Amino acid sequence: MKGRRRFLTRVIPTTFWASITMRSLSRNAEAKTVENKSYKVFTTTEAETLAAWCATIVTGAEEAGVARFVDQNLASDQAASLLLLRYLDASDMAGFYRKGISGIEKECLHRFGLPFVQVTDDQRVEMIQAAIASDMQVWTDPDPNFFYFISRSDAVDVVYGTQEGFADLNIPYLAHIPPPRPW
């Protein structure tokens, strides 16, 4: 009797903690799988670069989900896209964004020796200012100034083009038909 009781008092807590650990590991693995599959067009690195670029232009763009907004619109039918680029006769919208993100990275590596997501805020601002002034050293395609214009529009749409964004600006949101989702 004593042996069985001692056995159970040792096995039950061990089994309990092992099951919690296994469940936690399983959830972490699921979260990483979802994270890796969360973008339909962009790689995680491309999405992080675009989000950091847009957050430098418009505060709050990264938290508002600008990379996901662009990615979802690129993955959907172009005729239904909410991106400004749709109206500017762009036949390969995904290619435009990929080339722009690649240009950001190449220019940043050339100037600072680091990817855009790793440079300081001042260096990010310097990159934005160079794009506005069309003063890039290695990035030429797409035109950095035009990419800035498009990405700024995306960032503004995500941060201020929602009901919450209007509320932050103290502007009444008077949609005839409220949208089913923020964007």
Image (cartoon, rainbow, N blue to C red):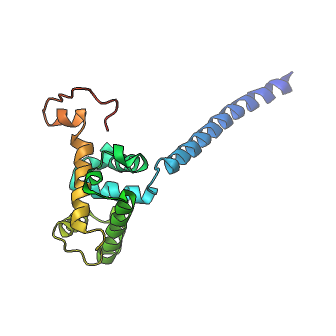
Q: Residue at x 22, y 56 (%)?
A: 57
Farthest residue toward the top?
Answer: 1
> Foreground residue, 17 or 3?
17
Specify the quadrant of the image occupied by residue 46.
bottom left
- Quadrant in which the C terminus is drawn: top left
Specify the quadrant of the image occupied by residue 134.
bottom left
| Image location (x, y in percent) of residue 157 | 24, 45
- Whether residue 124 is visible to the viewer of this picture, yes or no, is yes
| Image location (x, y in percent) of residue 50 | 34, 57
| Image location (x, y in percent) of residue 118 | 35, 64
Depicted 10 relative to depicted 103: above or below: above
> Foreground residue, 105 or 181?
181
Q: Residue at x 31, y 73 (%)?
A: 107
> As drawn, is 47 to the left or to the right of 33?
left
Specify the quadrant of the image occupied by residue 88.
bottom left
- Quadrant in which the N terminus is drawn: top right
Q: Residue at x 78, y 27 (%)?
A: 8
- Whether residue 122 is visible to the viewer of this picture, yes or no, is no
| Image location (x, y in percent) of residue 78 | 37, 49
Q: Residue at x 17, y 28 (%)?
A: 174
Q: How many marks?
A: 0
Depicted 35 relative to depicted 173: above or below: below
> As drawn, is 22 to the left or to the right of 49?
right
